[in-house]
Amino acid sequence: MYDLLIKNGRIIDGTGSPWYYGDIGITNGKIEAIGLLNANEAKQIIDAGQQVVSPGFIDMHTHSDLVILDEPLIEAKVRQGITTDLLGQDGIGAAPLPSEYISTWQKNLAGLNGTPLIEWDWETVGDYMRKIRHNQPSYNLAVLAPHGNIRMEVMGLANRPATDDEISKMQDVLRRSLDEGAVGLSTGLIYLPCCFAEMKELEALCMVLAEYGAPLVIHQRSEGDEILESMDELIAMMKKCGAHLHFSHLKVCGKDNWSKTEQVLQKIDEARLDGLEVTFDQYPYIAGSTMLSAILPPWAHDGGTDEMLNRLEDEQMREKMMAEMETAFAGWDSISKWAGWDGIMITSVASEKKKYCVGKTIKEIAVQEGKKEADVALDLILHEKNSVGMVDFVMEEASVKRILAHPAGTVGSDGLLGGEPHPRAYGTFPRILGKYVREEKVTSLEEMIRRMTSQPARIIGLQDRGIIREGLAADIVIFHPDTIIDQATYENPRQFNMGISAVIVNGQMVIEGENAYRKPSGKVFTREYAVKKRG
């Protein structure tokens, strides 16, 4: 007797193979049978009515790290068909987190992950994973070990190269985190304190990844002016290490750089031909989103948020920041230079006093306040103590589509959930399936489903899901291929999509039409490794 039977579905199994008609019988959270099945042998039946039945989507870049401890069912995610989130991104996740850095780290994450009212009572990656598990999430979570957290545990937030001894200790912390179940290492070379690391440090950590067969998930140091040079140094490093290189939110930023898109993809193809595994994730929009303080040069972040705020009060340092933001410099991309002040829109603040800024560009706020744009931006970071989110318009549609067509890609929403967020937090997966697959035919539906399911599952080592196959976990999405589409916009981002009729997590119905059910159906994955012998 099946717990749940899905009848009359057009099954797209996640492998890239053509769809086929079939029924799916689910028992004890797993797919027990596929074929023409007897409805009399089921406790519950869903008639898919020839809708598409696919594996649940895996979001390869998320910032739900803190929100998931406050909201076990994040509707913005599961209503997109997402059944698994990958946490710990950009090198600045929730754990590891030594107790002496809790206050500093809360401030550092405020503009990215929000400030939910939770108890910060974990230290290691294993502690953090246990806390999520205890909170009984309604969908699945996997966790990356963040480079910045590892560096902070070993040497704090100082702007200096790590010593050989400190690098060795970072390797030990990374091994501990992987042994606790982390699925790889992340870094964000524009974020504190990752931006202070030399390539020697990153290479040593990637040697550990090669031991474990785990990926480096990287927000590279340049996504525009020096993107080709940035990719070259990473590919050269990975050829030495032999580890898997995965680019976060692959894009080409700045009008002067958009022509580099073909060269970016060519570098990925050439590296793969040379035997290096290179993959990436992407969101389908021409605007990015992060904390507003990302507009500041790296040296401004030295020592953490409190030190950065002190510098913003120093007139000479402010002048230096503003000059460098206007021109950029070798080794650092200036987001404000790329976007312009009319291309940076505030999405979230902490105080009621500055709520009027949300939804406005820096230029609009400057006109309203009668101040220079750069002063408005720096004053806002200072007033809100770094708890400010932004959307920055730095990409072009043709480049987005060209990257989206590449077979080495996966999908990541990169959604920040506070304030009035970027629409990608609500619309990423339906937007790709509706706008780019159905309407613009960038690639086939079967191929895109593969890149949302089995490909990310393979990258992060989830061996029991990502494919509809007997014996595997029943993470399943049912949707109308002719109507699925996003509805979230920059002006009104908190809108759920159209066209997804059911989402099933480990055999449990979490989304059924307009209804969302909070159930303890999610799992926190603990990746297991067959570690190669060292030395």
Image (cartoon, rainbow, N blue to C red):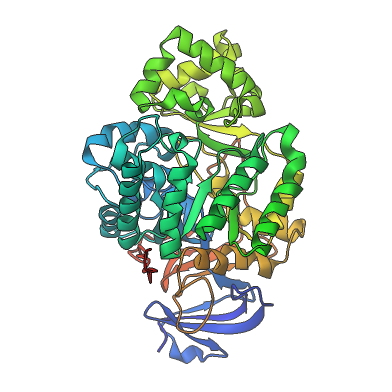
Q: Position of residue 179 (x, y in %)?
A: 31, 62
Q: Residue at x 53, y 56 (%)?
A: 240
Tell me, yes or no, if residue 52 can be seen here: yes
Q: Nearer the viewer, residue 2 or 89?
A: 89
Q: Position of residue 118 (x, y in %)?
A: 27, 42
Against 510, is 365 above or below?
A: above
Q: Nearer the viewer, residue 435 or 58?
A: 58
Left of 93 or right of it: where is 294?
A: right
Q: Position of residue 101 (x, y in %)?
A: 27, 35
Left of 235 or right of it: where is 118?
A: left
Q: Nearer the viewer, residue 410 or 359?
A: 410
Left of 494 or right of it: where is 123?
A: left
Against 428, is 109 above or below?
A: above
Q: Nearer the viewer, residue 386 or 90?
A: 90
Against 370, is 223 above or below?
A: below
Q: Residue at x 41, y 12 (%)?
A: 313
Q: Position of residue 162 (x, y in %)?
A: 37, 38
Left of 118 or right of it: where is 314?
A: right
Tell me, yes or no, if residue 495 can be seen here: no
Q: How many marks?
A: 0
Q: Quadrant of the C terminus?
A: bottom left
Q: Quadrant of the N terminus?
A: bottom left
Which quarter of the figure has residue 176? Answer: bottom left
Q: Residue at x 49, y 54 (%)?
A: 216
Which quarter of the figure has residue 49? Answer: bottom right
Which quarter of the figure has residue 532? Answer: bottom left
